Image (cartoon, coloured by chain):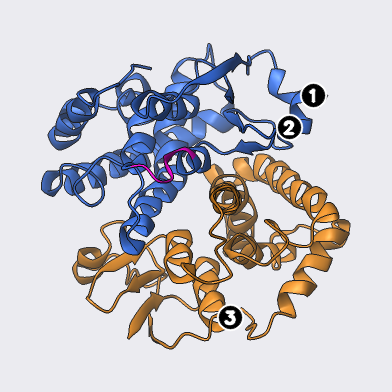
Chain colours: A orange, B blue
Amino acid sequence: MLELLDDPISGNGYKVRLLLALLDMPYEYTAVDILKQETRTPAFLAMNPNGRIPLLVIDDGTTLPESNAILHYLAAGSAFLPADRLHHAQVLQWMFWEQYSHEPNIATLRFWNHLPELDDVQQIQIPAKRANGVAALALMNEHLSAHDWFVAGAPSIADIALFAYTHVADEGGFTLADYPAVEAWIARIKGLPGFIGM
Amino acid sequence: MLELLDDPISGNGYKVRLLLALLDMPYEYTAVDILKQETRTPAFLAMNPNGRIPLLVIDDGTTLPESNAILHYLAAGSAFLPADRLHHAQVLQWMFWEQYSHEPNIATLRFWNHLPELDDVQQIQIPAKRANGVAALALMNEHLSAHDWFVAGAPSIADIALFAYTHVADEGGFTLADYPAVEAWIARIKGLPGFIGM
């Protein structure tokens, strides 16, 4: 059976849990505590030298890190990963954009908001991360004003990857009410059969 | 014919140029000057609302941004993108890692090294980016000490994506000589038939 090593507080882990629920796939869940450095133990680093969760363990014992690569593996052959060459690349386009232009701003500001205090290196980066996060939400809103889903008119792992940190962006000081097309898309995802919350 | 909009100084653009050369695919090249803000004109933003190069224009006029998504599109059906489900996901694992854990440290410090001066926000981030870049090169070196290529024993778009900014890491103040397995891998890539330099 598939095993998922994950910290329940992780949005990247939630991407995987949500897709597993939507696909109705059984799996074993092993909780790993990031804040207790449990991803930096020799045993964990032997499974993922990058020391991060989520980490998928496949039946033969192979370990697969990187949330978006795990989504791709799990969605293969399902409706959440279109087979068409261009649509496939467009799904990945949004997922790479999520990792480079969305997560480091929107997820990071939410994480920092939950810390007791910030150091100088964090503090000075807030304005740029705020501006980049606003730009990311505006870009999503523009796309979703003309499309129900990110790619090819149907929910895909691009939507799952982007949903995880977008739907809790308010916790990072963003105002989702400013992006009505994003809010409508969030409601559509919450209506998918099998949906689970974070 | 395929068209590539790109700035010749871009390492993300070089990924695409290198793969096109290795695949011996013809294309038209349109140079766009980032420093002159040519990616922020209304005409460019109509093609890519994210305002970035490289941007691939496919025969029917569809535009595809994000360097790693472009690599995936171009490599489909070739030896540079393994068809096996797990290998495919492992190629993407390294490509997502490149965008999240490698490029923002190694490429950014190289870019900053080429600027006449840095502002306070950049200056204060240097130590963390240095440490994260060293960790990324060490992780690559560990993997390449046991493998000739990143996935499945053959060159793939994971290698192409990682090669672009790794082979010029010295320009960002890193010391490639400290990573002998990375240097040997760089030499293997330079030996691929059709290889072109940056």
Query: Which secondary structure lies at badge 3?
Result: helix
Give the secondary structure at mark 1. Answer: helix
Query: Mark 2 and mark 3, same subunit?
Result: no
Return the x and y of residue A177 as percentages of the image width and height. 87, 62
Residue flagged by tag 2: what amino acid is it? Met
Where on the picture, by quarter, is residue B17? top left
Q: Position of residue B30 (x, y in %)?
A: 61, 16
Disc on res. A22: 3
How much space separates mark 1 and mark 3, taking CA atoms?
39 Å
Q: Is residue B11 left or right of residue A137?
A: left
Frontmost residue, B69 versus B117: B69
Residue behind mark 1: B43
Res B130 visible: no
Give the distance between the C-alpha atoms of the residues marked 2 and 1, in whole angstroms. 7 Å
The magenta stretch spans residue A26? no
Q: Which chain carries label 2?
A: B
Residue A196 in the image, given as x and y percentages of width and height: 62, 83
**Identity, as a three-letter code, of the amino acid under mark 3:** Leu
Q: What residue is shown with label 2?
A: B47
Considering the image in quadrants, where does the N terminus of chain B appear?
Answer: top right
Residue closer to the observer: A117 or A146: A146
Q: Which residue is drawn at 37% across and 29% down?
A: B23
